[in-house]
Amino acid sequence: MRRLPIRPLAGLAVIGLLALTGCGTETAGSTADAASGAGADRTIRAQQVMRLTEVHETTGMTLLEGPTFAEDGSLLVVDVTAPAGEPKVLRVDVGKKTSRAVHTDDHGAYTSAQFSPYDGRLYLTDFSHGDIVSLAPDGSDPRTFFTGEVDGAPMSPDDLAFDREGNLYVSDSRGMSEGEATGRVVRIDRDGKNATVLADDLAAPNGISFDAGYRGLWFSELTRNRVSYLLLDGKGGVASRHTAIRVDGGIAQTDSIAVDADGNLYQGLHGRPAMAVYDRYGERLATVEVPARAAEGLTSATNVAITPGGTRAYMTVSGPAGGYLYAFDALAEGVRQSNGG
């Protein structure tokens, strides 16, 4: 979540929700890349697939997030700032380059999407209301899965990840609008009844993903440009926590995270239409970029979904020019950890 001048949006905690910066972008060979490690000179050029959305007149912006593949091969994407009546979840046929509305409502600001391995439903985080909702795969039957306070404080849920059993792990960006390090990582049992804080005192936690072996969680902090690692104890708790990667993003900030079959991290950037790719030891392997000729008017690359069992990756890119899908070849195959969140 990010910063950008916007018009009033009823029902949204806009300052915290969209700390969006309408800043310029960097291109290949920038000093930010050069400072980030030995692998930073490898550039992967993403290619435009299609424009999905335009700037909404009501909200003054569009912001695509949470790409996730359904079982039928279609790609679902959320538009965080879509107003009531306009598509908040879209289904994309990447082969035909077509899209259609799946869900809308009169209040939600959905910042991520992922299918549960437990019940097969699509789960969405509603940042502005602190809720987690679920839909049937076709977008019908909306239900509130979780709402209310956790340890006496409301949530601002941003991204989510599932373990193998279907329990949820959520980045809670509370305190973002005040600039306070009061964010958390929260675990919610798959029945939605019990919530536990796994990490706190965080600065606007955003991306979250399991590692390739489900031993621990990677999570990013937007306002500290760092990625940390939570080693889990296998009993619903934490064995250890440490800062794993410090992202040299310059004006760009750390957004969502995806992990491929080899354990590589794809770190989305806000403030630049690009992603930084690291191995599990923190070595910078590559930078995925929108070509310079297309980068004007694009200010973020929030997230990516890698085709399950394949290497074709689809990145959500947004800015004043609209909301787009860009594609590139990932370094390894897609798995659950690289499909949504």
Image: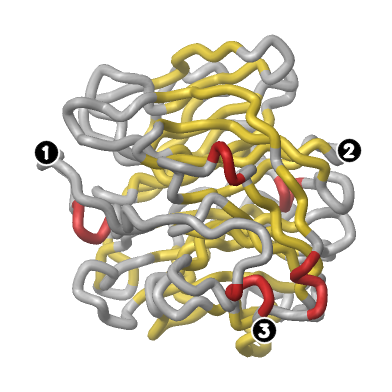
x 66%, y 59%: residue: 28
Label pair 2/1, CB-CB below 8 angstroms: no
Q: Which mark is residue 10?
A: 1
Q: Quadrant of residue 203?
A: bottom left
Q: Secondary structure at mark 3?
A: strand
Q: Quadrant of residue 10?
A: top left
The residue identified by callout 3 is 244
Q: Is residue 227 above or below residue 114?
A: below
Is residue 144 visible to us here? no
Q: Secondary structure at mark 2?
A: loop
Q: Residues within 10 Å of mark 2 (few under 14, many from 20)?
A: few
| Residue type marked 1 | Ala
Is residue 264 visible to us here? yes
CA gap between label 3 and label 2 equals: 27 Å
| Residue type marked 2 | Gly
Rendered location of residue 134, percent (x, y): 46, 35
The residue identified by callout 2 is 309
Label pair 1/3, CB-CB below 8 angstroms: no
Side of 145 relative to 293 (left or right)? left
Q: Residues within 10 Å of mark 3 (few under 14, many from 20)?
A: some
| 293 vs 249, nearest the viewer | 293
